[in-house]
Amino acid sequence: MKWDEVPNPGPMPGLLIKYLKIDPVTGFYTRLVRAREGWTDHRLAHHPCYEEAYTLQGHQAYNFGDTKPGVYFFRPARVKHGHFVTMEGGATWLIRSDGELQNWYSQNEWVRWGAEAVNYGPEGGRMTWSQSSHDLAQLPSPRTPEELALLKKSVDYQRSLGKPDVDYVEHGAGTDKSLVALGLDHDHSHGDGAKEHGHSHAEWPEPRSLEHKDERTGENAHIWGQGRAWKAGMPIPAPIISTLPVRSRSAGRWDGDGM
């Protein structure tokens, strides 16, 4: 079989595919996907279906770690993932999903979470802890100059298509975007315009307004990661905030919350 360019719009050229099996009723497929060396996507994406893959060849780095030969991942539907940089020799995967991949992109991402400890921490086990993806990314795992150059190339490609885009900023660098979004950023010296793009709690949409109308009422409503059939014109489901968008060690890099 010959390699074909991936038909879904969005990513820059260099992503190739061989369809091995497609179920005509459910859309479940098995296929080979290959990314050429240097293929990059600086955004995060989520899909309506689950995605699992086994790495056959090559090396790719992304926000959940590195994929090298022998690395397997399973990703439930709607989980955000990305910041892909394909390294030396490109990369090839055997991939299966329970439906056709649709790419819905996010940028300028941030996550902030907190909790009150019950039976751990100082002073009798009581503390309040809040941390952002910016804080976690202070650990020493910088992108290499080569990776940053490729990520900038991905930004430039989207802009060449006339699409709105923002510069890729490595987590832990620049202004903490969670503080900007919460309206707590009082540092006006960064000069990147981030403050003007901030918003308040009052402007945040109701999460259920971003879901399918039957998202929380169907047979599998209790399983957020359940794949769902999606066709053009249907409402686009919101991503699941299931893991922090920082780099983790699935195979290399540093420890974090990944899969």
Image: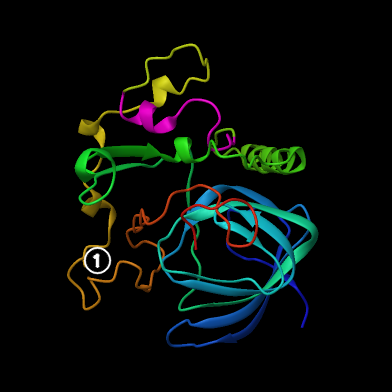
Task: Name the residue located 52 percent from the left edge and 20 percent from the top edge.
Answer: 192
Seen as rendered, the residue at the extreme top is 189
- Which type of secondary structure does the marked residue at label 1 adopt? loop
> What residue range appears in magenta?
168-183
Q: Residues within 10 Å of mark 1 (few under 14, many from 20)?
A: some
Seen as rendered, the residue at the extreme left is 217
State the image quarter where residue 234 is shown: bottom left
The prevailing secondary structure element of the residues shown in magenta is loop
Number of numbered discs visible in the structure rendering: 1
Residue 242 locus on image (x, y percent): 37, 57
Left-right relation of 215 to 22: left
Q: Which residue is mark 1?
A: 215
Residue 150 locus on image (x, y percent): 72, 43
Give the answer, above or below, for where 161 lies relative to 5: above
Closer to the camera in the image, 62 or 161: 62
Left-right relation of 128 to 60: left
Residue 179 locus on image (x, y percent): 37, 28
Residue 257 locus on image (x, y percent): 46, 55
Left-right relation of 3 to 141: right
Which amino acid, mark 1? Glu
Does residue 1 belong to the magenta stretch?
no
Does residue 182 belong to the magenta stretch?
yes
State the image quarter where residue 70 is shown: bottom right
Closer to the camera in the image, 249 or 111: 249
